[in-house]
Amino acid sequence: MAEPRLLDDDLVSQARGGDAEARNELVRRHRAAAYRFALQLTGNREDAADVTQEAMIRFLDTLQRFEDGRPVLPWLFRIVRNKSYDLGRRQKVRRAESLDELLEKGMPAPVQRDGDPAARLERRDLRRRVWSALGRLPDKQREILVLREYQDLSYGEIGSVLGVPTGTVMSRLHRARRALRDLLAEPDRREGRVR
């Protein structure tokens, strides 16, 4: 019979006590989510890998300050966010690999098992347009949309990641959604169509 899966709280406690396997399990459990968030913030696979590695090291180094009973992901995402900004400040010229190119190279996206080729093509086109529009948003709007819509964090968890009150999260999210909607509507407006 398989061993029951430990809760993050138990792993954090064990890791604080010096248990190397608990530290490794925390990394295994949360590295993919940290990488996806870093990729969505940086738009570059190599930068995302660097940010993720730095963030995981920082995460393990700060476990003593982590509040018991709190979810791990918001704490880790805050570290990823800070490391992403640190990287951006260190780089004088950022590589211009667009989110569209990342999609074509296989950026993680929801898998659709629909047999209709026209529907798949339409979804792919919409996904490309959304990623392109996300890439044109200011960093603060992009990150809040990614945290809510792609990482599925609650408003409170997003507030914890960003260091802002829940009301601020709600208002920023509203503005970011409106800005994204406006960017997505631009091609239709140019062609004289209104959605």
Image (tube, rainbow, N blue to C red):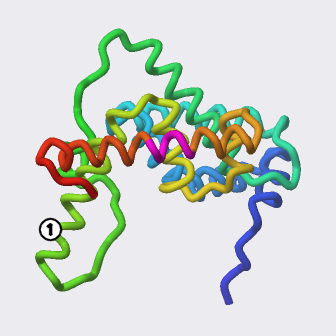
Q: Is residue 110 magenta?
A: no
User: Quadrant location of residue 39?
Assistant: top left
Q: Specify the farthest residue to the bottom.
A: 1
Asked whether 14 or 139 is in front, the reply is 139
Q: Is residue 126 above or below residue 27?
A: below
The residue at which mark 1 appears reads as 121
Magenta part, dominant SS: helix
Image quarter where the C terminus lies is bottom left
For mark 1, give the secondary structure: helix
Image quarter where the N terminus lies is bottom right
The region drawn magenta spans 174-178
Give x and y (percent) for residue 157: 71, 49
Give x and y (percent) for residue 145: 50, 46
Q: Is residue 9 left or right of residue 50?
A: right
Mark 1 surroundings within 10 Å by alpha-carbon count, few (fewer than 14), some (14 through 19), many (20 or more)? few
Asked whether 191 or 140 is in front, the reply is 191
* Amino acid at the residue labelled 1: Leu
Q: Is residue 177 magenta?
A: yes
Asked whether 110 or 194 is in front, the reply is 194
Give x and y (percent) for residue 47: 38, 31
Which residue sits at x=85%, y=52%?
A: 13
Asked whether 41 or 154 is in front, the reply is 154
Q: Is residue 88 above or below residue 46?
A: above
Q: Is residue 48 left or right of residue 86?
A: left
Total marks shown come to 1
Which residue sits at x=65%, y=46%?
A: 170
Give x and y (percent) for residue 148: 56, 52
Q: Is residue 35 left or right of residue 45?
A: right
Which residue sits at x=19%, y=72%?
A: 120
